[in-house]
Image: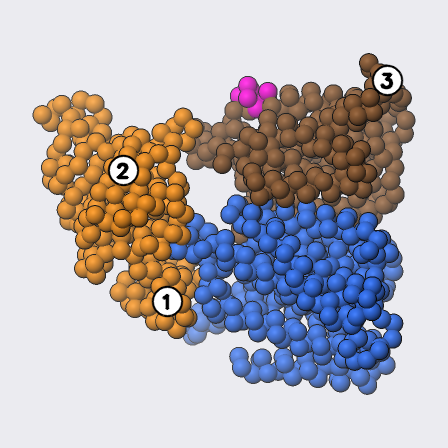
Amino acid sequence: MILLQVVVGGLLLGAVYALFSSGLTLIWGMMNFINFAHGEFVMLGMYAALLAVLWIGGGPVVFGLAAALGLFLLGVIVYFALIREVMRGPMLAQILSTFGLALLLRYAAFWIFSPNFITLPHTALAGTINLAGILISIPQLVAGLAAAVLATLMHVALMRTAVGSQLRAVAEDRTAAMLMGIRPDRMQALAWGLAAASAGIAGALMAISFPFSPAVGETFALTAFVVVTLGGFGSVPGAMLAGLIVGLIQALSAYWFGPIYKDVVVYGLFVALLWLRPQGLLGTA
Amino acid sequence: MRWGWLALAAMLLAYPWLVAGSASGAFLQDMGALVLLAAIGAAAWNVLGGYAGQISVGHAMFFGAGAYMPLLVYQHWQLPPLLGMPLGVAASLVVAIIIGFPTFRLSGHYFSMATIAVAELVRIVVGNWDFLGAAIGLQGPATARGWYDFVFRSAVPYYYLFLGVLALLLLVTWQMQRSRLGYYLRAVRAGERAARSLGVPVRRYKLYALMLSAGFTSLAGSLYALKTGFVDPDSGLGILVSVQMIIIAALGGAGTLLGPLLGAMILVPLQTATNTWLGGSGSGLTYIVYGGVIVLIARFEPGGLVELWHRQATARLMRRGEARHAA
Amino acid sequence: MLLSAEKVAKHFGSFRAVAGADLAVEEGEIVGLIGPNGAGKSTFFNCIAGDIAPTSGRVVFDGIDVTDAPAEAHARLGIGRTFQVPATFEDMTILDNVMVGAFLRHRRRGEARDRALEVIEMTGLQDRAGARARSLGTPGRKRLEIARVLAAGPRLMLLDEALAGLTPGEIQRAIELVHAIHALGVTLVIVEHIMEVILSLARRVLVFNQGHVIASGKPQDVVNDPAVIEAYLGRGHGRARQ
């Protein structure tokens, strides 16, 4: 029974991983660019939720929205101010740009918010629920389900809506998209906004179930890297599936080997993945 | 140009003697040693990141391997820390191959992601392994049993030791730059696809650069351990160790020979100064500024100060040429 | 037979860029490859050069099966190529660019430098040898690419629209350069849109359309082939010519 609990908990957290990793892989596929500050976007989503709770009050919907809007804006600004220019430059500039941004955001958060772990003031979502003999914490359940729904919505929107197909067109063939009258610049800015927003919401969702500090961004970034590699270059459905798998592996590792090793196993499997199947689950060889 | 090199060498050689007379002579000598140490790490990173264009954001793991091994052999077997240095280099090379071999046939992002993941993995494992000191870390000899322990009261012997290693590294880099390896690495950085079409064995050459870089970074770590006599997961394997190497190399000029030294000469004194004035809270601010500086370099001048200087020099030359034509 | 490409196909998902193409090149030939945009010529080149692996088919060079070999191996065996969009090493000087090519056959810096200077002289780039590649215009870059790959000592050179965008004077000089390269013993396969170039250089021409070869033969015969005219100008024109 405990094992089943662990599995469920892992999958629920995995759904959140799927949500924020989908954004990362969307950008990766579109621009061949890895955002090294993505973990910090998640972390900022957590703090956006905190600020929303402190200043506005209200439940998860309110601060989820606050995180989404705030981070969307940040993503778009980062794109126009930094990414767009750096894309034309050497690889050094591209990688250092978001790496530097990650440092800037992380230490600014340390400075502004203090390094201590905090939790969101208790909302209506407290307690545990008993489903068929398995005890699940309600905040984690809500976070996981909401993340799963949002990630699916993102995938569906990409597949079915006009804007979604424009985004995908730019990802597949920028020149052809331009010939069709699509503005790659706008689409890329939108993608950055969406990616940041999904990271922010994921952060807000995790904030209701776990204590957090500015330090957690680094770990989320690494988790996202593993998930997008496992999912396959640019594949949003891949990232969703991979998110669940990574969440599951992490939970099982913590259960079998101890909480210290939950990340170690994931990083170790990352290396193995690079050796054996770098294209991941749904990527092309 | 010849005179410039001689002047630089003379200044570096004479520095400890020059500052010896002043009131804070010992402090300045110590800082000189720290500048050189930082330059070694940054110059080692530069071989891979600057010349070959492969960006490692987890170089701390090589530094840490180099720092831990000497102190390990001392703490457990009372051997001179010096004997641990080759072990540090060997461990670094093994880790380098594990990361580089699979990722160098893929696009550059995979390598960068892998470096940060493995660096974190190593940090967590080491931080929880008692044999390696866990969170407390390892210590070296407090007093010298002989010269081979490299425990000196004054910073001056360390200064010259570090200067020697830096000179060696720069010499190796300079030689590499002029050789086929150097040309091929620059080609890989400038355009991998075109490089391949000219027969460049891309993956093999990236591995050469990585191994050279990792080996020398490990040496830097060992030198650090010799001087401070202490290492723990944060000072040896933390991300800030990687950050310092990157920012010093990038600020001075990634891909140039003297960029790392220039960057170290600017940043190390600056960092010491801010730490002294602002104390503990200063270090928090320092890293915000570091992040900002890295972003600015990436956005506006990826070639660093050396490139900036070159551009100003060329602009001045052109203006002078125009003035001459007009006259 | 120096190069033999048999039933080479390259599919990207459901899109068939190359749908089964054959090419046989004897040593010393100059073969032209023409066809409308998007016909698959560059992709075919990429398969021959080892840039990408064909979905099916075989590429044999000098008796060695190189179908799945990486581009570096192709280059070492003696296949050189230029790119449709010039891929020069922008921040390196012209001399350094060519030296990268020269290093394939010359280990030492001095020898590579000498070889590079020879080739730079031959291609007429000696005035700008110390300038960075990014200071060149597109024609200059194309010439640099040719010099760079020539320095690598290829037996077969694949030129992908190396003369596109040149002025008539430049085209004349480029044709002379290609003749000079051919005189050195290099076999050439040339993709071009400019008919005069094909007519003056190629002994044999293949026409590509929609991923396969639709005609081949002497240049004069091929340009009058109704199928070829139809490919370029669309339905109806071919029949009108008859």
Asked whether A258 or B223 is in front, the reply is A258
Circle 2 or circle 3, nearest the eye: 2
Q: Tell me, what hue is chain B?
A: blue
Q: Image point 47% across, 54% down: which residue?
A: B202
Point 80% across, 84% down: residue: B20
Disc on the earlier residue, 2 or 1: 2
Residue assigned mark 2? C6
Q: Secondary structure beneath disc 3?
A: strand
Whether tag 1 and tag 3 are in contact, CB under 8 A, the answer is no
| Position above or below: A13 against B248 | above
Residue reaching furthest left?
Answer: C242
Q: CA distance from mark 1 to mark 3?
A: 73 Å
Query: x%, y% of residue B71?
Result: 79, 65
Q: What type is the residue that disc 1 sits on?
A: His
Which residue is denoted by mark 3 in the rendering? A129
Among the 4 quarters of the image, the one containing residue C129: bottom left
Q: Residues in magenta?
A: A156-163
Q: What residue is rendered at 72% in x and 40% in y?
A: A265
Q: Vertical placement of B326 versus B98: above or below?
A: below
Looking at the picture, how far across and down is residue B55, in whole percent?
60, 53
Callout 3: residue from which chain? Answer: A
Mark 2 and mark 3: Cα distance apart in space: 66 Å
Q: Is residue A157 magenta?
A: yes
- Asked if residue A39 shows in the view, the reply is no
> Tag 1: Cα neighbours inside 10 Å, few (<14), some, or many (≥20)?
some
According to the picture, the residue beneath numbered tag 1 turns out to be C106
**Secondary structure under the numbered disc 1 in the rendered image:** loop
Q: Main secondary structure of the magenta part?
A: helix
Residue B185 falls inside the magenta stretch: no
The three-letter code of the residue at mark 2 reads: Glu
Q: Residue furthest top?
A: A132
Label 1 is found on which chain of the structure? C
